[in-house]
Image (cartoon, rainbow, N blue to C red):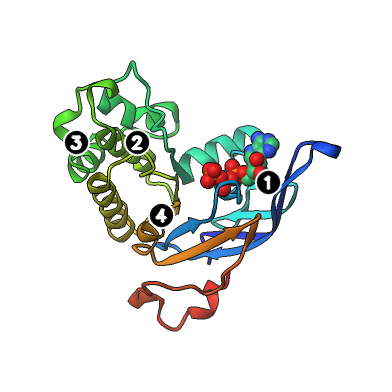
Amino acid sequence: MHILELRHVEKIYGEKENQVKALGDINLKVNPGEFIAIVGTSGSGKSTLLNLMGGLDSPTKGAIYVKGKEIGSLKRKALTIFRRRNIGFVFQNYSLMPVLNVYDNVALPVTFDSGNHLNHGYIEELLKELGIWNKRKKYPQELSGGQQQRVAIARALVNKPAILLADEPTGNLDSATTVEVMGLLKTSCRKYNQTILMVTHNEGIAQICDRIIHIEDGRIVNENNFINTKPSDAGEGGDFTC
Ligand SMILES: Nc1ncnc2c1ncn2[C@@H]1O[C@H](COP(=O)(O)OP(=O)(O)OP(=O)(O)O)[C@@H](O)[C@H]1O
Ligand SMILES: [Mg+2]
């Protein structure tokens, strides 16, 4: 089963003469454990696509399935819970809580979720993996951009989401930190079989991923563009059609 599937997804913003067609007829199938880059020029619809995939916004037409469930069919409260348990977000601006230290920022999504309990061992493992365990008592403003981004990644992974959606996660970082953060995402993808969809402007960064999806004017313009086919994917090529 595909972990994520989009069928004929369209997104129009605004009304009447102010309408903007941000996405048109997007069809996409994603396998568990895939690391996908979404590239395209500014305004091509990348963030819109990520927001729809994560249930932060709804499509004008079409359907989005996460783990086989059509997210548009969920009521608001059910969607919030489903999203919290299945989808992790990393934004370009980190969006950390300034009044919470690193540890509490990472634990926040678990604290929010009454049906879930705090797994200290896992948070420690994540923070160590990301090299920020020794910063756990620091506040966001005491950290560098790269360190803050790693906290944001740890927070996005803490609920072990089926899918991690990252919008330009390295957009504000220098090139050395970018390589580091990309390495961490790739490790997480392989070690936890984490599915990742990441928006980037940078073709070089995209080359690290398993697949690159090019978007132009709200449409996917490439098909079957493989970079690194994982051994486990052998023979399933037909499933990857965009
Ligand atoms: N909330 C909104 N209301 C109206 N139009 C919007 C809204 N959000 C995005 N758009 C429009 O939809 C189109 C796609 O925007 P989107 O933010 O998805 O692009 P993007 O590829 O993420 O661009 P960038 O690389 O600059 O972040 C653009 O024309 C944009 O102006
Ligand atoms: Mg964007």
- The Cα–Cα distance between marks 2 and 1, rounded to whole angstroms, is 27 Å
Give the Cα distance between marks 2 and 3: 11 Å
Q: Position of residue 106 (x, y in %)?
A: 32, 32
Of all residues shown, which one is farthest toward the bottom? 235
Q: Nearer the viewer, mark 2 or mark 4?
A: 4
Label 4 SS:
loop
Residue at the outermost top position: 99
Q: Label 3 amino acid?
A: Ile
- When the figure is inspected, residue 241 is found, relative to residue 144, above or below; the finding is below
Q: Residues within 10 Å of mark 3 (few under 14, many from 20)?
A: many
Badge 4 local density, few (<14 within 10 Å), some, or many (20+)? Answer: some
Instruction: Give the labeled residue for mark 1.
Output: 72
Q: Which residue, given by chain and number where applicable, does mark 3 sit on?
A: 132
Could you give the CA–CA distance between mark 3 and mark 4, rounded to whole angstroms? 26 Å
Label annotation for residue 62 = none
Quadrant assignment, res 68? bottom right
Tell whether label 3 touches label 1 (CB within 8 Å). Answer: no
Report the residue marked by disc 2: 152
Residue type at mark 1: give it.
Gly
Q: Residue furthest right?
A: 16
**Gap between marks 2 and 4, in whole Å?**
20 Å
Q: Nearer the viewer, residue 84 or 151?
A: 151
In front: mark 4 or mark 1?
Answer: 4
**Does residue 184 appear in this view?**
yes
Is 167 on the left or on the right of 130, as rendered? right
Q: Are the residues at dot 2 and dot 4 in contact (C-beta closer than 8 Å)? A: no
CA neighbours of label 1 inside 10 A, class few (<14), some (14 to 19), many (20+): some
Q: Amino acid at mark 2?
A: Ala
- Decide which of 40, 233 is in the foreground and name it: 40
Q: Are marks 4 and 1 in contact (CB under 8 Å)?
A: no
Q: Is residue 114 above or below residue 200?
A: above
